[in-house]
Amino acid sequence: MWKEGTPFIFLNSAKSAERGRHDAAHELGHLVLHRHGGPIGRKAEEQANAFASAFLMPRSSILAHVPRSESGDSR
């Protein structure tokens, strides 16, 4: 949420660290993507989840660490 121009994210501290990181990135996605409006409901949640995934596991970083087969192809 935004209050007087300042963003706030509230997290459930009873969740695992991994879940907390995803929740924080998901909520950051809402702040970044939907600050000035935009989709609501399922579409907004899908966008926030996609943002969190890309933020926490950037494609280029993941592919750089994927083991390669003997033929040189990545899995």
Image: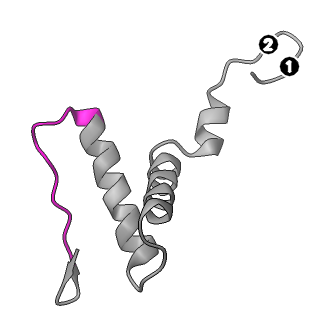
> Which percent across, then down, holds residue 53?
49, 46
Residue situated in front as seen by the camera: 61 or 12 = 12
The residues tagged by marks 2 and 1 sit, at their Cα atoms, a distance apart of: 5 Å
What secondary structure predominates along the stretch shown in magenta?
A: loop
Q: Residue furthest bottom?
A: 4
Q: Quadrant of residue 20?
A: top left
Instruction: Give the quarter of the image for residue 1.
Output: bottom left
Question: For the view shown, which residue lies furthest in the top direction?
Answer: 70
Q: Is residue 63 magenta?
A: no
> What secondary structure is marked by label 1?
loop
Q: Could you tell me if the residues under marks 2 and 1 are in contact, i.e. CB atoms within 8 Å? A: yes
Residue 9 counted in the magenta span? yes
Q: Residue at x 67, y 34 (%)?
A: 63
Pick out the residue farthest to the front: 41
The x and y percentages for residue 41 are 41, 65
Q: Is residue 6 left or right of residue 43?
A: left
Mark 1 nearby-residue class (10 Å; few <14, some 14–19, many ≥20): few
Mark drawn on residue 69: 2
Q: Which mark is residue 61?
A: none
User: Is residue 47 placed above or below 12 in the rendered structure?
Assistant: below
**Type of amino acid under label 1:** Gly
Q: Residue 54's x, y, as percent?
A: 53, 50
Question: Most extreme residue toward the left, as rendered?
Answer: 14
* In-image side of 19 versus 62 (left or right): left
Along the horizontal axis of the image, is 50 left or right of 20?
A: right
Q: Residues within 10 Å of mark 2 (few under 14, many from 20)?
A: few
Label number found at residue 72: 1
Give the quadrant of the C terminus: top right
What type is the residue that disc 2 sits on? Ser
Secondary element under disc 2, as helix, strand or loop, is loop
Query: Which range of residues does the magenta coloring cover?
Result: 7-18
